[in-house]
Amino acid sequence: MESIFIVIIIYLKSFIEFAGYLVIGQGLTYLLCFGKHKKNTVYKIFLFLTDPLYKIVALIIPKSINAKHIPYYTLLILFLSWLLLVIGKVISNYN
């Protein structure tokens, strides 16, 4: 039974890592495009992949927070979720 729990944690952790890499990649592409990110195909692909994440975070955070800050909160929530899963994995390995 514990092995199923560990496998679920590993899959969730890998999904969160992938989502975090997408958000970081979009940010780096934004910086490297020097203001022409709306025309960049790679940036559009990142935007397509990260848009569902941003919509979920927009539902979670208060409406008083500026929409420009949603990517930062998304990365913060992903990092905290990843940290909780790592802690859960470590704890389950010791039991």
Image (spheres, rainbow, N blue to C red):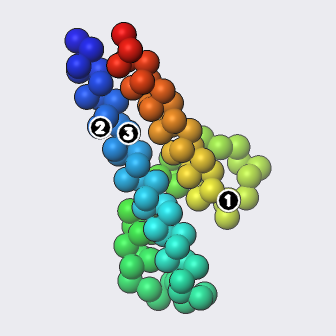
Relative vertical location of residue 54 with respect to residue 93 in this rendering, above or below? below
Q: Earlier in the sequence, mark 1 or mark 3?
A: 3
**Residue 52 visible in this rendered orientation of the protein:** no
- Compare residues 47 and 89 and report the one nearer the observer: 89
Inter-mark Cα distance, 1 to 3:
24 Å
Q: Which of the labelled discs sits on residue 11, or is there none? A: 2
Which of the 4 quarters of the picture holds residue 94? top left
Residue 67 drawn at (x, y percent): 67, 60
Give the image location of residue 13, x and y in percent.
38, 39
Q: Are marks 2 and 3 in contact (CB under 8 Å)?
A: yes
Residue kind at label 1, given as amino acid type: His
Q: Which residue is drawn at 51% across and 53% down?
A: 55
- Residue 41 versus residue 49 in the image, above or below: below
Q: Which residue is denoted by mark 3 in the rendering?
A: 13
Q: What kind of residue is marked 2?
A: Tyr
Element carrying mark 3: helix
Viewer-side residue, 33 vs 68: 33
Badge 2 marks a residue whose secondary structure is helix
Residue at 56 percent across and 52 percent down: it is 75
Badge 1 crowding class, 10 Å Cα cut-off, few under 14, some 14 to 19, many 20 or more, is: few
Check contact, mark 1 vs mark 3: CB within 8 A.
no
Residue under the point 48% across and 69% down: 26
Q: Which quarter of the figure is the C terminus placed in? A: top left
Quarter of the picture containing the N terminus is: top left
Circle number at residue 69: 1
User: Of the residues under marks 2 and 1, which one precedes in the sequence?
Assistant: 2
Distance from label 2 to label 1 (Cα)?
Answer: 28 Å
